């Protein structure tokens, strides 16, 4: 097998004469019409570029390229390459099949996810399941389009809140226009449904009639799409920290900020009980007023220290950054908010800029691709395309959630993007369970409730604020028993 070098399939720039408004999303059939190419497994340590840099002398994982149609409605047309991986069952005599895994995204590689999950409570399944991962199309070591990030320039310090929001929206719109033009045919096919079709090509290439699947975060949207398209090929599926059944970018922001407001109310009560340490007030109402006043003061008169690359701006957004988060963050929030009140600057304080997606990441993360993140969010998601509506929605959330509302986390990123092709999710008959977390704000619990209503299955409630934490909790035994033996989960965690 030839080495899997990151971005080996970087696309050439398509002539700008292709009108972006003409880019349409094609509804593809569920099944590919051509047989997938055979897989050629060999050690990832010898075939994946920079493997030792991130994984040392780890040699258990095998990798292979996989060729799939770019557009499943044209199975004999252009092909793209994906990178896939396999961690074989440690007890081959007891092997039951494969567990495909995806640890989230979009925009992120899951090539090494089998190794990551094998080191958690889910690892018990690796005795009788091959763990299988892959880089979703447009990420990692498969074919990708690399587009430099948006211009990091900030708006003038004197700009109004609306002017700052418009500056950020225009910056993202310019990024979209520039990146879409690089390879429109490729970028328009970066959808969750197409990644699900790629999963089924991988299943067929492995010669498996059915697969088990474990997905977290965006991986739950991938699993839900796969089950809706290929229900008969699912042996069992567990979705953890669940996405909503519809990628409505504005309502997603609303749900996130509702969780933040709930956490703020808990924070103010917690600080009031500890006034001897933090001195914000002895009642939740007094603490809330003190924190709102601090935010307002620094919004009007930001503090600037240092210069150049070392410049730190402490403003209203610096304060409100500590208003959300679960109970595990309250002690840190109290210390940093008191530090800000007393004239200090918390670690990591920075100029106020447009918020990035909930699903954002460091572009240097191995296998990450910012354009794939943007493409999936906008190809699948409705909203985020009109500034005036976005601003009105933002102001509405600021009124509803005075502590944490008023940002556009997802609803500011799809300017100039073609129309979305929303997910078409439906109930199936294959075994399905999912777990949602009561207090987390990355994938709010309300999304799990909505997904459960849309596609069925069993919903397990996890009482914590940690995204994707079930793999590290004792109740991971429910996941193992469900995927190994079909034991229906019940209760809460």
Image: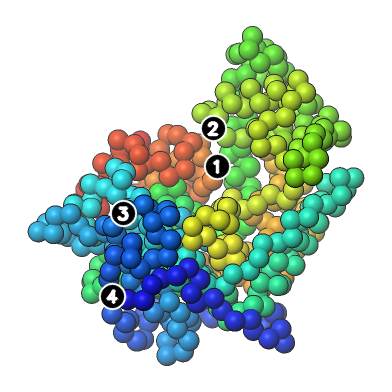
Chain-order first, disc 3 or disc 1 = 3
Q: Residue furthest left?
A: 93
Q: Earlier in the sequence, mark 4 or mark 3?
A: 4
Residue drawn at 72 percent across, 87 percent down: 17
- Residue that numbered label 2 is attached to: 326
Disc 4 or 2, which lies upstream in sequence?
4
Residue at 58 percent of width and 57 percent of height: 363
* Dot in front, 3 or 2: 3
Disc 4 designates what residue? 40
Q: Is residue 238 left or right of residue 300?
A: left
Which badge, 3 or 2, comes first in the chain's sequence? 3
Quadrant of the rendered image containing residue 472? top left
Assess whether mark 1 and mark 2 are in contact (beta carbons under 8 angstroms). Answer: yes
Q: Which residue is mark 3?
A: 58
Q: Please, what secondary structure does the residue beneath circle 2 have?
A: loop
Of badges 3 and 1, the one in the foreground is 3
């Amino acid at each position: 097998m030839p080495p899997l070098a990151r971005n080996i399939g970087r696309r050439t720039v398509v002539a700008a004469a292709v009108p972006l408004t003409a880019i349409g999303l094609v509804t593809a059939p569920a099944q590919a019409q051509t047989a997938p190419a055979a897989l050629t497994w060999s050690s990832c340590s010898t075939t994946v570029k920079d493997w030792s840099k991130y994984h040392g002398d780890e040699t258990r994982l095998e990798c292979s390229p996989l060729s799939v149609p770019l557009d499943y409605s044209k199975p004999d047309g252009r092909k793209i390459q994906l990178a896939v991986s396999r961690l074989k069952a440690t007890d081959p005599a007891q092997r039951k099949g494969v567990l495909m895994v995806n640890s989230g995204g979009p925009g992120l590689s899951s090539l090494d996810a089998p190794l990551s999950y094998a080191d958690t409570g889910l690892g018990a399944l690796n005795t009788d399941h091959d763990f299988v991962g892959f880089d979703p199309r447009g990420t990692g070591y498969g074919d990708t389009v690399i587009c430099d990030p948006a211009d990091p320039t900030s708006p003038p310090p004197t700009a109004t809140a609306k002017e700052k929001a418009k500056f950020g929206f225009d910056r993202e719109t310019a990024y979209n226009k520039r990146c879409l033009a690089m390879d429109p045919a490729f970028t328009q096919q970066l959808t969750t449904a197409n990644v699900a079709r790629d999963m089924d090509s991988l299943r067929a290439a492995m010669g498996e009639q059915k697969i088990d699947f474990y997905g977290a975060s965006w991986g739950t949207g991938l699993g839900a799409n796969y089950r809706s398209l290929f229900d008969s090929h699912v042996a069992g599926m567990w979705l953890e920290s669940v996405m909503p059944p519809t990628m409505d970018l504005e309502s997603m922001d609303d749900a996130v900020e509702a969780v933040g407001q709930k956490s703020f109310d808990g924070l103010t009560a917690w600080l009031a009980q500890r006034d001897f340490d933090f001195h914000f007030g002895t009642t939740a109402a007094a603490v809330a007023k003190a924190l709102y006043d601090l935010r307002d003061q620094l919004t009007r008169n930001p503090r600037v220290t240092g210069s150049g690359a070392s410049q730190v701006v402490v403003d209203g957004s610096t304060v409100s950054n500590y208003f959300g988060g679960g109970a595990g963050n309250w002690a840190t929030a109290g210390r940093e908010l008191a530090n800000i009140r007393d004239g200090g600057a918390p670690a990591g304080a920075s100029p106020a800029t447009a918020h990035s997606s909930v699903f954002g990441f460091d572009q240097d993360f191995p296998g990450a691709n910012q354009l794939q993140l943007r493409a999936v969010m906008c190809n699948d998601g409705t909203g985020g395309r009109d500034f005036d509506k976005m601003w009105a929605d933002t102001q509405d959330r600021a009124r509803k959630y005075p502590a944490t509302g008023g940002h556009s986390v997802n609803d500011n990123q799809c300017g100039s993007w073609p129309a979305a092709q929303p997910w078409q999710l439906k109930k199936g008959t294959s075994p399905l369970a999912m777990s949602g977390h009561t207090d987390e704000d990355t994938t709010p619990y309300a999304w799990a409730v909505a997904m459960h209503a849309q596609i069925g299955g069993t919903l397990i409630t996890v009482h914590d604020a940690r995204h994707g934490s079930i793999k590290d909790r004792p109740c991971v035994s429910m996941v193992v028993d469900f995927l190994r033996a079909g034991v229906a989960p019940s209760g809460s965690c």
